[in-house]
Image (cartoon, rainbow, N blue to C red):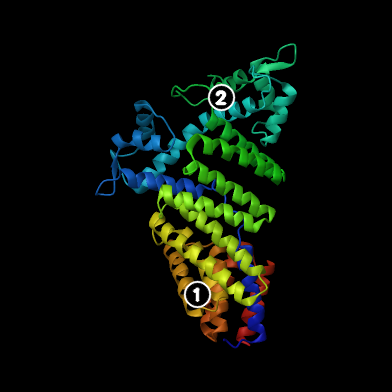
Amino acid sequence: MLAVSSDCCKHYERANRLACRSDAYPGPISEDRSLLTIATIQAVFDEFRGSDDRLSTAQLPAAMRLLGMNPTEEDVSQLCEGGCFDSTLDRRAFARFMEEALSKWLVQDQVQELLLSFQAFDTHGNGRMSVEKLVQIMSMAGNPFSAEELEEMLYNAGVDGDGTLAYRDLILRHFLSAESGAARGEWPSWSLPGSLAPVQEATTLSEIAKLRAGRGHLEDAVNLRYRALAILEQLHGPQHPDVAAALHAIAALKETQGRVEEALDVYGRALSIREKVLGPHHFYVAMTLDSIANLKDRLGQIEEEPSQQHVVMEEALAYACRSLSIWEKVFGPTHPHIAKILYNLAGRKDSLGEVEESLRLYDRALDIHEQLRSEDVELADLLGATANLRERLGEFSVALNLYSRELALREKLFGTTHPEVLELREIISSLQA
């Protein structure tokens, strides 16, 4: 057991506070993060790349279809010319190409989503809706249009004497008309939705659940998610990636509600399906592993029985280590996300008394930041945590150097009068005394 001074204990409390503020428990992990988009693009590249770690432009249409797009040859040609892409693309060029392609399809997706949302509330099924209800639905969705845009849309679509309008005309005229600022050149042909197909109904229920959760109606959101899950299970069977995604979303809602044991059970069901269907090294498996690790870490922090707390924290660590091995395969060993995972793992190792392993992980994370030449809050927190551990080990000169680096970075980020800067100066002064 390390012997520590009273000042060191204060510094340790500060390090814990920083860890809690950052990623010690980030809450339920959403699967809508850009991280998943990046990982998916990289997975598609790995599917098509040749032995020289490049792929040809002739392979782009097939790669785009894997990402949910349905391009024509002209679409691909325009994207290549506009982005000045070569006849073959390496990993970085492929990622840039796909990001540009996905942005082009975004407007089309917005049209689909709006149509599906309006259809879900179209109680008469006649494609018409009152202006009042239309405005209400847009407000529920965060109202993607300004008041002026909405007025222009209503004017262009035309409202009948009974106060209703054809919402499909309103949306299509806004997004696709030549006069609209939202129109983006030639669009690939696509069929407009009629009555909701089962998968569309499940998607719509899931989207409405997001809106309900955003307004704090968590129980309503859970019920809607379960309705979507039932549709997906009937459509695909119980062992399907969409079913696993629905379960993960339900577990995240239960986690937010504080129903921890229920959340762990549902996360476990999602993990089992993903491992079986996608394989044990898929990044969706890593996402669920991260969720379970964070939730078990949360349980460990509130467990009062020391022996049981140790067991739960060890379980959290095991899930987190599995996740790290997957993310390293996805991103490589020097990605910012890897540094973040290493930082969290080091904190868990420290809490279990595995000081040397904790230091090794902190040092790995620092090496990544140095290679990336990053200057952000995550690096500042990492420097602070490493410095505190070195201080507790009695390595005061090393700790002082790390604290000084942290101070310089925080002054650059927040200014010289920020409370954390002032607190850090006191820590450094106490070490120098």
- Cα gap from disc 1 to disc 2, whole angstroms: 53 Å
Say left or right for 77 vs 345: left
Q: Quadrant of residue 75?
A: top left
Is residue 433 in view? yes
Across and down, in percent, residue 272 comes to: 48, 52
- Vertical arrangement, residue 282 with respect to residue 334, above or below: above
Residue at the top extreme of this rendering: 161
The three-letter code of the residue at mark 1 reads Ser
Across and down, in percent, residue 117 comes to: 62, 29
Across and down, in percent, residue 100 comes to: 44, 38
Q: Quadrant of residue 181?
A: top right
- Image point (60%, 18%), residue name: 169
Residue beneath disc 2: 175
Residue beneath disc 1: 358
The three-letter code of the residue at mark 2 reads Phe
Few, some or many residues within 10 Å of mark 2 (<14, 14–19, 20+): some
Few, some or many residues within 10 Å of mark 1 (<14, 14–19, 20+): many
Looking at the rendered image, the disc whose residue lies closer to the viewer, 1 or 2, is: 1
